[in-house]
Amino acid sequence: MDKIIIKNLLVRGIIGINDDERVNKQDILINIVMFADTRPAAESDSIDDAVNYRTITKHIIRHVEGSSDFLVEKLVSDIARIILTEYGVERVQVRVEKPGALRFAESVGVEIERRKSDYQS
């Protein structure tokens, strides 16, 4: 499988369990690796045959800015589900980090890997 990478997408949103985190938006750093067959797009040179990472990025930004999850685990799972169920990607790795969330740590985060079959009933 080929990889499409979105690196260090910085979005501001509400996430966390502490009172101040429920009110004040904070930085949320997102990294995504999508696994898909890019050969059709390479052959046709058409966006219609490609995984449109611009559209995916806009969707993820809207979702993060509009959500108010308590746990990073919930947000990272939501992002994986969106990508796998709506954009023709077979497998995805998603990492969500909260920079500065812990004293003495650059960031804290959760990384998951999911397949399209994980979200099919």
Image (cartoon, rainbow, N blue to C red):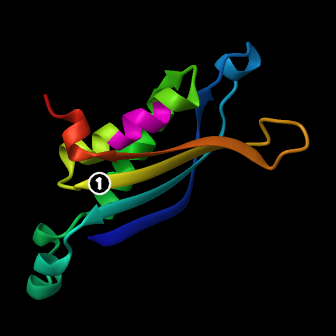
Residue for point 70% across, 22% down: 21
Please state the horizontal and vertical placement of residue 81, each as a whole percent of the image: 31, 38
Whether residue 45 is visible here, answered yes or no, is yes
Per the image, the residue denoted by label 1 is 91
Of residue 75 and residue 55, the one placed in the foreground of this image is 75
Please state the horizontal and vertical placement of residue 25, each as a whole percent of the image: 65, 31
Quarter of the image where the N terminus is located: bottom left
**Predominant secondary structure in magenta?**
helix
For badge 1, the amino acid type reads Arg
Residue for point 25% across, 63% down: 52
Residue for point 22% across, 45% down: 116
In the image, taking residue 2 as reference, residue 65 lies left or right, namely: right
Of residue 3 and residue 65, the one placed in the foreground of this image is 3
The answer to whether 111 is drawn above or below residue 67 in the figure is: below
| Residue found at the far right of this picture | 104
In the image, taking residue 88 as reference, residue 59 lies left or right, namely: right
What is the number of callouts on the image? 1
Which stretch appears magenta? 75-80
Quarter of the image where the C terminus is located: top left
Whether residue 23 is visible here, answered yes or no, is no
Crowd class of label 1 (few under 14; some 14 to 19; many from 20; radius 10 Å): many
Please state the horizontal and vertical placement of residue 42, each as a whole percent of the image: 17, 84
In the image, taking residue 83 as reference, residue 37 lies left or right, namely: left
Of residue 63 and residue 90, the one placed in the foreground of this image is 90
The answer to whether 90 is drawn above or below residue 105 in the figure is: below
Secondary structure of residue under mark 1: strand
Using the rendered view, name the quadrant where residue 45 is placed.
Answer: bottom left
Using the rendered view, name the quadrant where residue 103 is placed.
Answer: top right
Please state the horizontal and vertical placement of residue 12, each as a whole percent of the image: 60, 40
Q: Is residue 68 magenta?
A: no
